[in-house]
């Protein structure tokens, strides 16, 4: 495997990781907005994939 191929692979992995982080941050932002709107924790967890405990923790931080 040449150096160029290795560097391309590293770049691709970095891009994939960045996309994953961005997607997770977007879901977190949506969940926090739903908390502010008064939606119940179970529904937010179902919609976003986060645990009810995580939603409850964010709810405590918000208030």
Image (cartoon, helix red, strand yellow):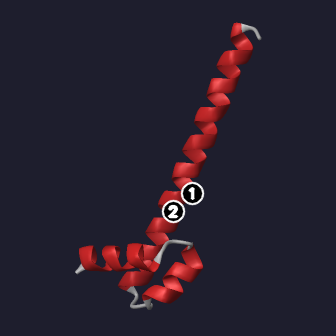
Question: Residue 42 vs residue 13: left or right?
Answer: left
Residue sitting at x 53%, y 52%: 22
How far is disc 2 from disc 1 in space, using C-alphas? 5 Å
In front here: 11 or 55? 55
Q: Quadrant of residue 49?
A: bottom right
| Secondary element type, mark 1 | helix
Residue marked by disc 1:
23
Q: Give the farthest residue toward the right.
A: 1
Q: How many marks?
A: 2
In front here: 20 or 53? 53
Q: Quadrant of residue 1?
A: top right
Residue sitting at x 69%, y 22%: 8
Q: Give the farthest residue toward the top.
A: 2
Q: Residues within 10 Å of mark 2 (few under 14, many from 20)?
A: few
Residue sitting at x 57%, y 82%: 46
Q: Tell me, yes or no, whether the two marked residues, 2 and 1, touch with CB atoms within 8 Å.
A: yes
Question: Residue 21 vs residue 53: left or right?
Answer: right
Image spot of residue 15 (x, y percent): 61, 37
Question: Residue 7 vs residue 59: left or right?
Answer: right
Residue 26 circle label? 2
Image spot of residue 51 (x, y percent): 48, 74
Image spot of residue 45 (x, y percent): 51, 79
């Amino acid at each position: 495997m040449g150096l160029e191929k290795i560097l391309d692979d590293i770049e691709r992995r970095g891009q994939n990781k960045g996309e994953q982080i961005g997607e997770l941050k977007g879901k977190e932002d949506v969940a926090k907005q739903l908390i502010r709107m008064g939606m119940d924790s179970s529904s937010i967890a179902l919609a976003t994939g986060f645990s009810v405990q995580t939603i409850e923790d964010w709810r405590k931080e918000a208030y």
